[in-house]
Image (spheres, coloured by chain):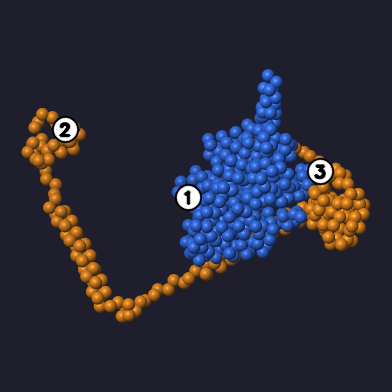
Chain colours: A orange, B blue
Amino acid sequence: MRFIWIFSILIFGIVSTTSTQGQEVGDADLTEPITILDLSDKTGIPSKKLFEILKDNFLPDIKNNLTSLEIPPEMAIRAIEEFERVKLSYIGEIVLVGMFTVFTGLMLTAVFINLLAHANPSVKSVQPDLKETLSTDTVAAITAALFFHQNQRDSEDREGEELGLTWHRNASILWKSNRTMPNGEFFSLRYTGRRERGRR
Amino acid sequence: MKDFIEFFGTTAIASMDWRYLIMVVIGLFFITLGIVKKYEPLLLIPIGFGIVLGNIPATLGVYHDNSVMNILHFGVRSGLYPPLVFLGIGAMTDFSTLISNPKLALLGAAAQFGIFATFVGSSLMGFTIIEAGAIGIIGSADGPTSIFLSSRLAPHLVGPIAIAAYSYMALVPLIQPPIIKLLTNSKERVIRMKPPREISSREKILFPIIGFLVTVLIAPGASVLLGMLFFGNLLKESGVTKRLANSASNALIDIVTILLGLSVGASTQADVFLKLESVKIFVLGALSFCIATATGILFAKLMNLFLKEKINPMIGASGVSAVPDSARVVQHVGHQYDKDNFLLMHAMAPNVAGVIGSAVAAGVLLGFLGR
């Protein structure tokens, strides 16, 4: 639904307009001493393209004014008309070159990124020379540490086993044992959820 | 009484007309969107307040020579702020996902078709070819790039282009999901991708250097933007310039964002902004954004025809460079169909590639249409 809303705005929001290029060309007073850059600003034609159209006949200078470059106004108007003629193909050219450049740029980047994986330092399993790096004292210390560690683990395991062996479930009559067992109060809380009052 | 009337004549109320009021309401709407809906608040609140600020008549605004706002706006006119924003973005961005799966960079390239499609559309809608280039870049969904290119090609359109670009960036969560759902089927939406491999710090350090050299040699027009982006990333990844990376990714980008947002907002004075041209730019911007999203998805589907390990075509939508919003949208949509499918990291790869791609596209347009 939201998409239809956006789409309809796009479709109905587009206002049909006609090109204002011709009017702008008319506005450009070519009898004044203007440069190709000024002409580009007035007509909205890229200066590089304008220069490209004119360069066959004139000096490659876009900063000097048209008069000093000996470009007659008629020639400038003809160049503008020439641009109007090739405008669509020029736009197509920009689109093609643009997409090609973007794809090439990112594709080459991707290729180089792939190569980066080879820049990783190879992980070699280093076998230290025990004779050189370990003194007898170090070996003794490590052995002692391992012994104590293992000893501690064993004693923990043993303790766990003893607990497991000594603990066993006894069948008992709760209502009888409730008064006699030291944790009777705990049982009453545990099984009834409330403290029994007046028993003790 | 006479003094009072004279004083009243100097107030903004006396000079206020309906156009300024409309703009003030738009500004307040932006602020509300930022605060209530939390759509890009870091951008919409400065821009919204800037719109309100710029549309109080009888104040010294952006277009008054040597006023404070005019001086702040210099950073927009001269294209100074965008490269600084790119420096911060570079210092914040982690390119690991792109490095681990470089083929996803192509999705970032495909999404740039929105720029060129809108360029064609704008030319056909009566804009001059130079203006069309500036408008087309809205399709990159990249605010700084849009401001940079429009300040170079069509300075008189910087306001509407920047507002359109930032508005659509903020509206990514609304615009993209319907297009994603329309162009993918339920099977494609649940495709799971292999987790990205671990990237060594050496690769991370080499990437900005190689990436910069490759892209800038192809599109030298984008050297400023790309240079700053990759430089920022090198500061982050080198590991020895943490202070600089921290400054770029925190203090610097925050300051520039405040100045950029405020001065762009303030440049939308009603008499300059409320024109048919602006409406057309907004329409074209939306179109551009939709096309960019669609081409990203369609290209991902095309890639799947040739790939053994299929990619989830939804991540193509994040080829637009709205970082990280569009990646977040892909994750969100993917999560609706498969709760255990985490697409965010995969979507970040085309997302960051889109930033590079849009800068390259801007460089190409500048090369053709710039002075």
Q: Residue at x 63, y 56 (%)?
A: B225
Q: Residue at x 60, y 37 (%)?
A: B49
- Residue designated by label 2: A195
Q: Are marks 2 and 3 in contact (CB under 8 Å)?
A: no
Residue B306: image quadrant is bottom right
Label 3 CA crowd tier, 10 Å (few <14, some 14–19, many 20+): some
Q: Earlier in the sequence, mark 2 or mark 3?
A: 3
Label 2 CA crowd tier, 10 Å (few <14, some 14–19, many 20+): few
Q: Is residue B255 left or right of residue B269?
A: left
Residue B341 numbered tag: 1
**Where residue A132 sits in the image (x, y, percent)?**
32, 80
Residue A155: image quadrant is bottom left
Chain bearing tag 1 is: B
Residue B28 numbered tag: none
Q: Amino acid at mark 1?
A: Asn
Q: Is residue A26 left or right of residue A179?
A: right
SS at circle 3: loop
The quarter of the picture where the C terminus of chain B appears is bottom right
**Where residue A189 sits in the image (x, y, percent)?**
17, 36
The quarter of the picture where the N terminus of chain B appears is top right
Vertical comparison of A122 with B338: above or below: below
Residue most extreme to the front: B3
Q: Are marks 1 and 3 on the same chain?
A: no
Chain bearing tag 3 is: A
- Is residue B302 in view? no
SS at circle 1: loop
- Residue designated by label 3: A19
Disc 1 and disc 2: Cα gap in Å? Answer: 51 Å
Seen from the viewer's position, the closer of residues B239 and A101 is: B239
**Where residue B20 sits in the image (x, y, percent)?**
68, 31
